[in-house]
Image: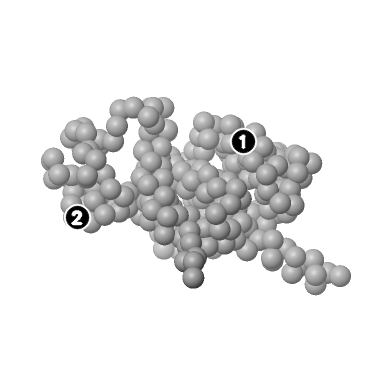
Amino acid sequence: MPIAFAPELPAFILGACIGSFLNVCIYRIPLSKSIVTPGSMCPHCGKPIRFYDNIPIFSYLWLKGRCRQCQAPVSLRYPLVELLTALLFTALANRFGVSVEAAIYMAFTAAMVTITFIDIDHRIIPDRISLPGIPACFLAALALPNMGWKAALLGVLVGGGTLFMVAWGYNMLTGKEGMGGGDIKLLAMIGALLGWQGVVFTIFLASLLGTVVGLSIMVYARSNMKLAVPFGPFLAAGALAFIFVGPELVGWYFGLMR
């Protein structure tokens, strides 16, 4: 009897390795540094990290969260990004198996994880990711079922146009910038891959999550309504949620409307 191939374990390992690289991107891209050279190094002492000390998740646990060279503490963020990416890749492999669809969504997920943590740290969504991401997602959408160039183009227009109108309207009413250009380009990128339905789902869930989290932070920190909360992570979360459950929920909703 042949043994069925389970893609989840390889996907977990791949995700952890990709997550390790994403940590480099998260740290270097906002500083306009190369993500290729030099190799990984300790941010405290600047010494290169040996390959056996750079094993995702495991090395952090083995070294008890410290640099082998200078014994400086290493942020818990590093293994958490690796674990998060590994779990997301595992979930994608479980849902889509070994397929082009899974590969496309894994690459998109890696971009969303990178954008999320950069926006949390620096309140920016780098053009180095979103601008090339729009045509890349547009082309990738052509390989997805139930997508095509028209659906992808409409997703770009609805995605970028929706937030642009929100930002323009807020600026006209208050004279202040309420939505950054990075969010607009990010939603255009999301629309290029997920179509207009993905855009609507993403905006709805991102707004819901953003409201709940924002109010919770303000209550905890006793801040006023002027507290700035980055919106990029919520857009990324909404887009990833659509990949896993969005089509079913959209189909269920339109079924109720008949």
At a point 66% along the width and 61% down the height, the residue shown is 246
> In the drawing, what numbered circle is on residue 258?
none
At a point 69% along the width and 66% down the height, the residue shown is 249
State the residue in front, 160 or 133.
Answer: 133
* Residue 43, percent from left and from top: 25, 37
Is 100 on the left-hand or right-hand side of 114? right
Q: Amino acid at mark 1?
A: Ala
- What residue would you read off at disc 2? 62
Q: Name the colour scheme.
A: one colour
At a point 64% along the width and 54% down the height, the residue shown is 202
* Residue 68, percent from left and from top: 15, 44
State the residue in front, 126 or 96.
Answer: 96
C-alpha distance separating marks 1 and 2: 38 Å
How crowded pointer 2 is (Cα within 10 Å; few <14, some 14-19, many 20+) is rated as few
Is 222 on the left-hand or right-hand side of 64? right
* Residue 23, percent from left and from top: 37, 43
Q: Sequence order check: which comes first, mark 1 or mark 2?
A: 2
* Residue 177, percent from left and from top: 60, 38
- The kind of secondary structure element at disc 2 is helix
- In the rendered image, the quadrant that contains the C terminus is bottom right
Residue that sits furthest to the right in the current view = 258
Q: Is residue 213 visible?
A: no
At a point 37% along the width and 47% down the height, the residue shown is 17
- What residue would you read off at disc 1? 136
Q: Is residue 51 visible?
A: yes
Q: Quadrant of residue 138?
A: top right
Residue that sits furthest to the front in the current view = 1
Q: Quadrant of residue 134?
A: top right
Q: Amino acid at mark 2?
A: Trp
